[in-house]
Image (tube, rainbow, N blue to C red):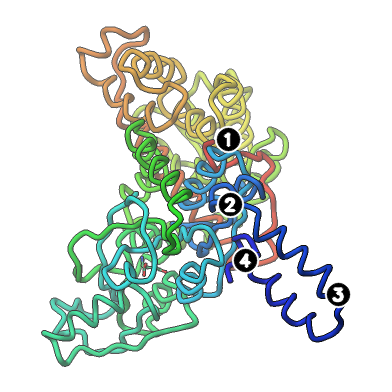
Amino acid sequence: MSDVSDKCDGLLILVTNMRVISGLIIVSIALVLVLNACAPQRTVLQQVLAMGELKILTRNSGTTYYEGPQGSAGLEFELAQRFAKKLGVKLKIVVPDNLNGILEKISDGDAHIAAAGLTVTDERKKQVRFSPAYQTITQQVVYNVNSSKPKSIKQLDGAFEVLAKSAHVEQLKALKGKHTNLNWTENTDADSTELLSLVAEDLIDYTVADSNEVAYNRRYYPKLRVAFDITEPQELAWAFPITKDDSLYNEAKIFFEELKASGELERLLKNNYQHVQNYDYGGTHSYLAQIRRRLPTYLEMFKEAADKYDLDWRLLASVSYQESHWRPNAVSHTGVRGMMMLTMNTAAELGVSERTDPYESIMGGAKYLRKLIDKVPENIPEPDRMWVAVASYNVGYGHIEDARKLARKRGDDANKWVDIKATLPLLSKRKWYKQTRYGYARGWEPVRYVENIRSYYDILVWHLEKEQPHLRNLRPILAFSSNVL
Ligand code: GLU
């Protein structure tokens, strides 16, 4: 019996049991049964609407659902949140222990939807019903840079662990037909992120993970490398229990169709992945080293400045790393200087007299960032607001306004960072910049700049939580919600 559907059968059992006890009880309970049996059965959709709640099963990972510094986040969360909002109900998130738990629970009808980065496979289609796909991935074999790169399946002869009940196992079983020497262990406890960390720490030799998970986690584990793909592109989709009742499923189908047609799905994917894909993995190693080596010297300064100007110190530190790699004497060919790379004029405006003084520079940079945030129109919601402000730290606010105007002209959404980011590079093209107030700008630079800072920020948060788990509940001073509803 599903715990998300109506419960008429339960009453029938109750009545049967009662009958043995006393004639009087039979009469009253049987009446309840008749009333219930007569009530028309509600569809799943009607039940969801009546309960005011959509129950989804998911898993905890950066690509699906996680509690980030700015609240709940992850693509699956954002999708489910939007769907619940469309239905006008609350979202209830349940995170079973492992993939097996998710698949079993959804095919038993223990929740309405499994939204867990699930790969659509033929085997699974026997068990669940998939929504239209929202993303495409490949399965990748991952190894540690300290070992030699396996060139083909034949060379996978070390400790090879994969996630039990995953689409990866299904694929390996298919490959085993041709590669009879292929062997692996199925891990029922770890999730895919943990398996990747085991490879990074040299505790196992190989694992398989979805390409989006690999890209996301490589930023944290610079020793991870992709050996090769073992599938053609595969689809990720939501899974529904197989029943005759199409009501909720059809609603989800329409939801995805609309999301695709409006370009919103593409925006969500870009928001979640573009900065990950463009990240220069080579930089993580030295970034992590500097988090240990240089950051401690300036940590208190970042915290003090962030406090004073109502910012998240980790964001401020990430901007500073992007600017100067936390070197107080940093200087660029354009003459900007110091930890926060201020120009002479900006420094003067901010009251910074010694740009190479780390304290002065950090305080000045924080003040400047606060000014920029306050300039961004209120109708740009967080976190986009933050990225727009950070982009203007790099390129100047005037160019950002130009890009927003161009975005509007092109029919894009001038209040969404993904659209502003798509427009910014046009500022380097005459056809476009001649239509603007501030003219030419190397518009691709702020795009790359923000992408780097987002990754530096993610890595810093991840690192702090790993090293100091008590910081896990630390709320940022500048609270912004990472879902873009
Ligand atoms: N998409 C894969 C699957 O559905 C991976 C899941 C995971 O990494 O947990 O099996």
Residue 298 can be seen in this image: no
Image quadrant for the N terminus? bottom right
The kind of residue tagged 2 is Arg
Q: Which mark is residue 42?
A: 2
Which residue in the rendered view is the most extreme toward the left?
A: 178
Residue at mark 4 to residue at mark 3: CA–CA distance: 27 Å
List the residue tagged with mark 3. 25
Q: Which mark is residue 361?
A: 1
The kind of residue tagged 4 is Asp
Along the viewing direction, whichever of 380 and 319 lies nearer the viewer: 380
Which badge, 4 or 3, is on the more N-terminal residue? 4
Which badge, 1 or 2, is on the more N-terminal residue? 2
Residue density around tag 2, few if under 14, some if 14–19, many if 20 or more, within 10 Å:
few
Residue density around tag 3, few if under 14, some if 14–19, many if 20 or more, within 10 Å:
few
On screen, residue 335 versus residue 140, left or right, reads right
On screen, residue 293 versus residue 180, left or right, reads right
Secondary structure of the residue carrying tag 2 is loop
List the residue tagged with mark 4. 3
The kind of residue tagged 3 is Ile
Contact check, label 3 and label 2, Cβ < 8 Å: no
Residue at mark 3 to residue at mark 1: CA–CA distance: 81 Å
Secondary structure of the residue carrying tag 4 is loop
Residue at mark 3 to residue at mark 2: CA–CA distance: 28 Å
Secondary structure of the residue carrying tag 3 is helix
Contact check, label 4 and label 3, Cβ < 8 Å: no
Q: In this view, does 338 lie above or below 25?
A: above
Contact check, label 3 and label 1, Cβ < 8 Å: no
Percent of width and height locating residue 446: 38, 31
The kind of residue tagged 1 is Ser
Residue at mark 1 to residue at mark 4: CA–CA distance: 58 Å
